[in-house]
Amino acid sequence: MAKPTTRYVCQACGASYARWTGQCTACGAWNDIIEESLTPVAAKGRKRGGLATVSLAAQMPDQPRRPTGMAEFDRVVGGGLVPGSAILIAGDPGIGKSTLLLQVACRMAAEHGCLYVSGEEATEQVQMRAQRLGLGDAPVELAASTSADDLASAISGNRRVKLVIVDSIQTMATELLDSAPGTVTQVRGSAAALIRAAKDSGVALVLVGHVTKDGAIAGPRVLEHMVDTVLSFEGERSHHFRILRTVKNRFGPSDEIGVFQMSDRGLEEVDNPSSLFLAGRTEDVPGACIFAGLEGTRPVLVEIQALVAPSALATPRRAVVGWDSARLSMILAVLEARCGVPIGPRDVYLNVAGGLRIQEPAADLAVAVAILSSLSGTPVAADTVVFGEIGLSGEVRAVGRADLRLREARKLGLTQAICPAPREDQRSVAAGLRKDMNLREIARVAALLPLYFDADADADVTTVRSRGI
């Protein structure tokens, strides 16, 4: 028998070393390198044959997607589960990953066989959760196991099961590798065995993944490359709703979101998230602005709040919740350098109400409006929506799908919009929307100053500063 091979593997990135070292030179992590022993597996004596090929133009069998019964979940994965696909869902502890997947399994079990495998809980604990959610009568098969080999055999030998949920992949281990569960080697080896069994049998496989304290998926980065879809389950524990976001999807769009509301009966779907994010909004308050965002193909309206206050510190604070702090610094620099707005000695606080995290640059103009409104003490009109990208020279650039954003705003009763001039391919659409909304199209950020200050749109920096704010 071959001797076991010992190596040292970084648990953050998967880099291997011949000897132990305190810091990983690949990712810079400290004290994440542990010793792993790999036992070589003897060859089975299988005859090596030629590689089977298929023509690209060959007729492929039709494999329709399998709806889960949860419209928001189906939207995120691209319209339903693809047979033989592997999905990885990750999120913070206690965010509701197990609850969401248990609800998916119970709804889908009405038409297809579902297997829920827990490596962290006993079957009795899963049953208790299902009864609490009112799903105790669902025909879902439960198992409590940490053996990836046994589960792969069960997937290959059970043709009735169409969905397998593994909670979580960090608890699985294969006997072919002599290392502890949760290590980089075991996570990679267990995932490879389960994904291969799922693709051979046409079973949709859902893997639950842990996250690190930095929010990244724990384990080797190759795990995200092995699966077909990566989903991120986000949300603040202080808020009652959760967001399921697509990070990667080989079978559909990679930027969709699904919105759920946490209740005592589990996660409830939210058909119109814009009304949820704007619920409880207080009108006529300086620094509050409605932004029309786009998450995949879904327009979402959310309130952006800004507070500009005098600072007692030598270095003023810049606090951001729900947006990119570097992007805020850029907007503040543009307002000061191109518009003459002296924000430097003041604290700036920015918050996306409701806990949604915005990633697109179309929120630049809404952030600038919220800051100017807070600084001047002039509220933004309650029926106004704002969107647009800001460049370093102070220009306001057009953004994609302005028609969807405006239609969503009009549907919620908003009648005014501050936005950039549409592109050539969108001018006909904008002309049609003018019948229902009053569009204020601006080309530069300086055009916002007359709305909140005693300044001209073409005033230079010196003139605006001399008037004071």
Image (cartoon, grey):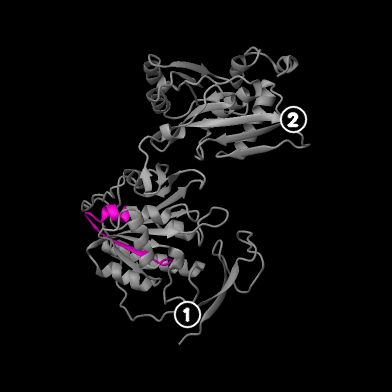
Residue type of the residue flagged with mark 1: Thr
Q: Which residues are magenta?
A: 104-121
What residue sits 31% from the left and 61% below the top?
199
108 or 215, which lies in front? 108
Residue type of the residue flagged with mark 2: Pro
- Residue 234 lies, with reference to residue 384, above or below; the image says below
**Disc 1: which residue:** 39
- Residue 438 lies, with reference to residue 264, above or below; the image says above
- For marks 1 and 2 on the same chain, the one whose residue lies earlier in the sequence: 1
Q: Callout 2: helix, strand or loop?
A: loop
The local crowd at label 2, few if under 14, some if 14 to 19, many if 20 or more residues have their Cα within 10 Å, is some
What residue sits 64% from the left and 62% below the top?
25
**Disc 2: which residue:** 345
Residue 442 % position (x, y): 53, 18
Q: Callout 1: helix, strand or loop?
A: loop
Residue 228 shows up from this direction: no
Rendered image quadrant of residue 468: top right
The local crowd at label 1, few if under 14, some if 14 to 19, many if 20 or more residues have their Cα within 10 Å, is some
Rendered image quadrant of residue 31: bottom right
CB atoms of marks 1 and 2 within 8 Å:
no
- Residue 60 lies, with reference to residue 386, above or below; the image says below
Residue 298 % position (x, y): 39, 35
Residue 290 shows up from this direction: yes
* Residue 109 is a magenta residue: yes
